[in-house]
Amino acid sequence: MIRFDDVTKEYPGGTVAVNGLSLTIPTGQITALVGPSGCGKTTSLRMINRMIEPTRGLISIDGKGVADLDAATLRRGIGYVIQHAGLFPHRTVLDNVATVPRLLGWDRAKSRAAAQDWMERVGLSADLADRYPSQLSGGQQQRVGVARALAADPPILLMDEPFSAVDPVVRQQLQSELLRLQAELHKTIVFVTHDIDEALLLGNQVAVLRVGGILAQVARPADLLAAPADDFVADFLGHDRGIRALSFVGMPRLPLHPELTLALGEVPPADAPDWMLVVEGGHPLGWVRTAGVQGAVDTSDLNRSGTVASLTASPREVLDAALSSPARRGVLVDDAGEFVGTVRASELATLLEAGQA
Amino acid sequence: MGWLSTHGGDVWTLLLQHVWLAAVPLVIGLLVALPLGWAARRWRAAYPILVTTSGLLYTVPSLALFILMPLILGTRILDPINVVAAMTVYTVALLVRSVADGLGAVPEDVRAAATAMGYRGFRRLLAVDLPLAVPVLTAGLRVAAVSNVSIVSVASLIGVAQLGNLLTDGYNRAINGELITGIVACLLLALAFDWIIRGIGRALTPWTRA
Amino acid sequence: MIPTIWTWLTSAQNWVGSFGIGNRLAQHVGYSLLVVAIAAVIAIPLGLWVGHTGRGRWVVSATNAARAVPTLGLLFALALWVGPHIPGRAAFVVPSVIALVLLAIPPILAGTYAGVEAVDPAARDAAKGLGMTPRQVLARVELPCALPLLWSGLRSAVLQVIATATIAAYIGLGGLGRFLIDGLAQADYAQTAGGAILVCLLALVADGVLALVQRVVVSPGVSGRRRRRRGIILAPGKDMGHGNVAHTTRA
Ligand SMILES: Nc1ncnc2c1ncn2[C@@H]1O[C@H](COP(=O)(O)OP(=O)(O)O)[C@@H](O)[C@H]1O
Ligand SMILES: [Mg+2]
């Protein structure tokens, strides 16, 4: 557990970057620090590993004040990932990842073995090991940055906007891989971002800071969306809060409807409903408008507009599946991706309205 | 000061000679380096060849180059042309890279926008690429100018007259005033060149002065 | 003309003895190594310190401005003013060595400083954040990353020293410059031109050797020899061959 106790940072020149911050960062969870640019996120983060010293107040890790520890020793026990990765251009990827183990005095072979292991765990293929950072894409560089931070298996990970310099597609991949890794590792992660959606997605707990370094609210994502503390937090959360909140609430027990399905090459029966789902080997392919089909169904008849939700999906995804389906019936699949039934938006809305979530 | 008061006329003559020996190669060197630097940009394969060659030329020690020039040009050993030619070689060696890098420093989107507006080939070079390369070019020219002023003084060892004569003569006859005058005159001349080139560069790039 | 130069260069008697080419070459190499070593010992730590701390940048600017001092004038001034205070044969050597060291410092200092200055701030920040001590940041990140520019400064300095050591023959230093200076005094063009050719070859070989050593000591990750295989090719010129950052006046 990391604790901020009434911590203030005033830079020479008079900027108060962090003002009276008190915050508890629970062990084994992701705490997202979010807020507009210049609100003191980076300053707060960097006070944890003493890259910046607070002007007043106390920061402690598991009850021990960080100010009492040797800075370099403290930092070797805390993973650190930054926006532009900050890889060492003169070292190969493997040597970059092996940095902290070497600093801790592990021998070369053990360090390299650990580095190889962590490269694999963050999804870097082994043939990148001998490359230099300038030969990697931005997304690969960030992965190396994460592997390097984890290489000595520190219990704490500090991440300062690690994904904000990569393109949206890669960012999404990195985000979901971080969640996957965290499910195995249970690190105490402090994740700084200016992107509220990223904070809501990754954080078990989200701390919203306002300019001047004042903590506006700290809460679980669902609670933040459900009960913003003030106008600033509400504004910062932005539009579509009701819809976005559906990502974080539990899925009510919803009636699943059976569906008449077709396989490719079949002719729709005479009494067919308006829209029928085409399923091949259990997997849903899309909807067909039976009136428009000439003879047997082929792939050119498919309407693919509908999204598909899994049985474990959030209400948001299930609702989207229903609303995006041309038949207005949302397709649900099981873990293997096989069709299990359809749902109706109206039924879900009724349950959500009744507050059964 | 005492020495200078009685030798002002000589110093003036030598100064003019020095200006001539340092400035002419600067102008010729620039004129030669511009097309070469442009070629280095234009053809990928030309870049390493030109940069390596100019790097090699730059390794040749000045006194050696002065001495070997007659052998290459077929001139007499005391001919000032040797010094002009040698200084031109150094200037070109330095500037080819400045021109190439300066032209390369033009942002790709600016170049694309100019092309899209219908600028083409040589006109785009004159209207867009070259003006934007001026800061890098100016920096190269300033280095070359200051360097030239110093190197030209070495030519007094092979008997070509300029401010270096004050250094050589001051040393040979142990006349402190003459030696100091020579050093100060070279220094001031170098600073004057530097100042003038910087001024021209600024005049050509009004947009860099916000 | 050329045949007589060739004869001078190839006649065995010109190569032997204490005034022979062999000995002069050894002197030239020896003085140059000594001078560059002294200059490096002064300039590299100073450049690292200025780059690392960001303090004392004026030192770099000042030494850069000093390149406007004519090398010939510096050489003669030291010979005239320092020489007489030094006893014996050292009177000819010490002023030259001082002048050469003074000339070699600015390019090495500028290259080292520029190299450290150019280190990616994110890499420096990460190094600190991962738990490197300031000394480790300097030795393991800043120095290796600064090496390409440091090395090009060193190469400039070596060329500068070889060239100026030639001229220093005029104030009594040994080395290949003797052939040029003595040849000029005796109007012996074969000797003068032969010496000039030898000096050119020495400079060329020295620069070539340093270029080869550079390939060994500079990591391919920062030398510009390996770049991203896919995507944009970075602008050439990033590798900063010599003469790019650390120009000083040539002699
Ligand atoms: N080293 C510094 N010196 C002075 N002011 C700083 C320094 N670092 C940050 N600041 C100021 O402190 C405030 C908070 O900065 P920072 O913690 O970087 O914000 P964020 O990471 O949320 O964008 C800003 O106003 C910034 O300008
Ligand atoms: Mg920040």
Image (cartoon, coloured by chain):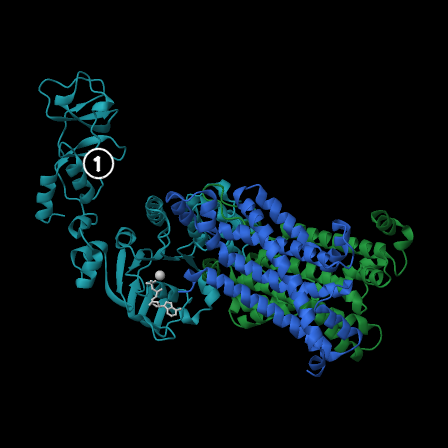
Q: Is residue B77 above or below residue A21?
A: above
Q: Colour of chain B?
A: blue
Q: Is residue A68 visible?
A: yes
Q: Quadrant of residue A189?
A: bottom left
- Relative to B118, say whether C192 is above or below: below
Chain letter, colour cyan in render:
A
Tell me the quarter of the image containing the C terminus of chain C.
bottom right
User: Which residue is tagged 1?
Assistant: A307
Query: Could you say which is closer to the camera, residue A118 or residue A52?
Result: A52
Sort mark 1 into few (<14), some (14-19) or many (20+) by Cα contacts within 10 Å: some
Give the residue displayed 69% in from the left and 70% down from the top: B13
For the point 59% across and 69% down, the residue is B191
The amino acid beneath tag 1 is: Thr
Identify the residue shown where x is 40% and y is 71%: A53
What colour do you see for chain C?
green
In the image, the residue with mark 1 has its CB under 8 Å from the nearest atom of ligand 2: no
Q: Nearer the viewer, residue C80 or C57?
A: C80
Give the image location of residue A357, x and y in percent: 14, 48
Q: Quadrant of ligand 1?
A: bottom left
Relative to A293, say whether A222 is above or below.
below
Q: Position of residue B169 (x, y in %)?
A: 77, 73
- Does residue C12 appear left or right of residue A115 in this picture? right
Q: Is residue C49 left or right of residue C158?
A: left
Does residue C249 appear in the picture of this structure?
no
Q: Tell me the residue at 72%/77% (across/down).
A: B178
Relative side of C92 to A354, left or right: right
Mark 1 falls on what kind of element?
loop
Give the camera-side residue of C145 and B16.
B16
- x, y (%) of residue A9? 35, 72
Location of residue C244 by image quarter: bottom right
